[in-house]
């Protein structure tokens, strides 16, 4: 099995690049043409590692949140709707939707553009696999 660092890192890097692009579009959108632009670009030179580390830590935080983890597990083998996720979590659909929003923002899941369906990204699948492997190693050491 093994963690595919390139796939997980690449997916999180794509998410970072998307956020930077959104900030750049926002910076170019001027309602008041005379106002000054932002003091700092979305991703200043030399700060790529720092920004990437933030995105990786955020993904790990969302993946290890108990409810977020449960959603990732529910998506392990198939896409699901917000209604299905809410039923499995035992919560209102709006609450499931918000958990999914957090996972989307972290780059771990993606929504279908044309339907109420959500599925794992390469980063989400990779972190699931990585955590499974760590748990298996820990369980093996716990056996007498």
Image: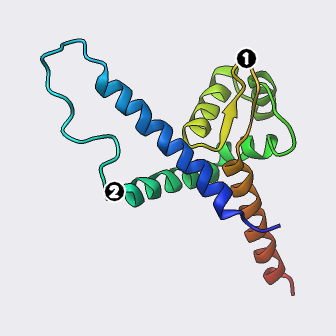
Estimate how packed mark 1 is, as few (under 14), some (14 to 19) or many (20 or more) residues with alpha carbons within 10 Å.
few
In x, y percent, where is residue 70?
A: 74, 44
Residue occupying the point 71% across, 49% down: 122
Residue 95 x, y percent position in the rendering: 63, 26
In the current view of this chain or complex, which residue is farthest to the bottom? 144
Tell me where residue 105 sits by quadrant.
Answer: top right
Q: Nearer the viewer, residue 134 or 126?
A: 126
Q: Is residue 86 left or right of residue 28?
A: right
Tell which of 62 and 116 is nearer to you.
Answer: 116
Q: Quadrant of the C terminus?
A: bottom right
**Position in image of residue 125 (x %, y %):** 74, 51
2 or 1: tag closer to the N-terminus: 2
The Cα atoms of the two marked residues, 2 and 1, are separated by 36 Å
What is the tally of numbered marks visible in this picture?
A: 2
Q: Which mark is residue 52?
A: none
> Image quarter for residue 117?
top right
Q: Which disc is residue 114 wearing?
A: 1
Element at label 2: loop
The crowd level at tag 2 (other Cα within 10 Å; few <14, some 14-19, many 20+) is few
Residue 30 to residue 37: above or below: above
Contact? badges 2 and 1 (CB < 8 Å): no
- Residue at left 53%, top 50%? 13
Residues 132 and 19: in front is: 19
User: What secondary structure is found at the residue carrying circle 1?
Assistant: loop
> Which residue shows up at 77% across the image and 68% down it?
2
Q: Would you place residue 80 above or below residue 33 in this image?
A: below
Does residue 40 appear to the left or right of 63 in the view shown? Answer: left
Q: Nearer the viewer, residue 131 or 125?
A: 125
Counting from the top left corner in percent of width and height, residue 82 is at 74, 24
Residue at the location (49% across, 51% down)?
Answer: 55
- Quarter occupied by the N terminus: bottom right
The residue that label 2 is drawn on is 47
């Amino acid at each position: 099995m093994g963690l595919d660092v390139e796939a997980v890192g690449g997916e999180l890097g794509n998410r970072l690049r998307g956020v930077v692009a959104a900030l750049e579009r926002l910076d170019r959108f001027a309602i008041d043409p005379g106002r000054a632009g932002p003091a700092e670009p979305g991703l200043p030179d030399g700060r790529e590692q720092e920004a990437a580390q933030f995105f990786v830590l955020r993904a790990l935080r969302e993946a290890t949140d108990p409810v977020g983890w449960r959603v990732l597990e529910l998506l392990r083998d198939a896409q699901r709707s917000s209604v299905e996720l809410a039923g499995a979590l035992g919560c209102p659909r709006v609450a499931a939707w918000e958990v999914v929003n957090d996972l989307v923002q972290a780059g771990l899941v993606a929504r279908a553009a044309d339907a109420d369906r959500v599925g794992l990204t390469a980063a989400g699948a990779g972190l699931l696999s990585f955590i499974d492997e760590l748990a298996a190693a820990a369980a093996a050491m716990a056996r007498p």
